Amino acid sequence: MATTSDPGPVYFWRETDPETGYLSQWYYCPFKDDQGEKKTYKTAEHYMMHQKAILFNDEATALEVLKTGNPRKAKSLGRQVKNFDETLWLKHRRDIVRKGNILKFTRAITEEGFKRGTPGATQPSSLHSPIDGSLADMLVNTGDRELVEASPFDPVWGIGFKAADADAARDSWGENLLGKELMEVRRILKERRDGQGA
C-alpha cells in the first residue's frame, strides 16, 4: 500500500486495483448524503451524476442515477441530463466532485468495498497486503504525495495517460481534476483532524 515515505505520485485509475482503487470515482463504497439521510450513493460517480442532474433540474434522471447499481450506467445517465448548460457545469463540477468525495471518505456506511473493490469483483488480490483502517485514514496516509488519475482516456478528470507512461509524458498531462480534488479533500480531512487533536 502507498505510504507517506514513498516518493513520487500516487497513480490510480481502476476501482478494482487492490492498492489504489479506493481513490476511483467508481469504487464501491456506499455513503450517505449529509443533506438527507434517505439518500445513499453507491459510488462517488453516482453522487456526481445525481448532483449534475439536480443542478439542471432533471429530477427524472437524478432518480435513475440513484436506482442504478453500476457507475458506468450512472455516468451514461449523467451524459443525458436535460437542460444541460456547459458554462454552468464548468462552474460547479469541481465543487460537486469535492463534496461527493468528502462524503465518501467521511460518511461510508459499509467497509465492504475495502475488502472487495466493487460489486462483481471476483475476490481480493492475495498478492498484496489487505487494506485495513478507514477510508479516510487511507487517504490521509498518502501524505503530501501528488494524487494522479492515470486514465489514458480522460485528459480532463485524469491525465490522459496510463501510469506506465505518465512520468515520461509529464509535460503533456491533462488537467487531473479528480486528483486535484482528492488532494483538497485530503487537506480538509487533515485540517479537521488537527482541529480535533487527532
Image (spheres, rainbow, N blue to C red):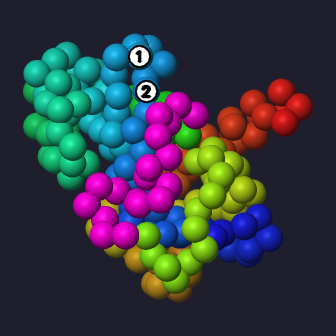
Residue 60 visible to the viewer: yes
Graded by Cα atoms within 10 Å as few (under 14), some (14 to 19) or many (20 or more), the crowding at tag 2 reads many
Q: Which residues are magenta?
A: 106-123
Front residue of 11/172: it is 11
Magenta highlight: main SS: loop
Give the image location of residue 117, x and y in percent.
40, 60
Q: Are marks 1 and 2 in contact (CB under 8 Å)?
A: yes
> For this view, does 104 lie left or right of residue 153?
right
Q: Residue at x 48, y 19 (%)?
A: 34
- Residue type at mark 1? Glu
Q: Is residue 132 above or below residue 91?
A: below
> For this view, does 166 lie left or right of residue 68?
right
Q: Which mark is residue 100?
A: none
Q: Which residue is mark 2?
A: 32
Q: Residue at x 17, y 32 (%)?
A: 67
Q: Which residue is mark 1?
A: 37
Mark 1 → mark 2, Cα distance in angstroms: 6 Å
Give the image location of residue 177, x and y in percent.
47, 50
- Residue type at mark 2? Lys
Quadrant hosting residue 92? top left
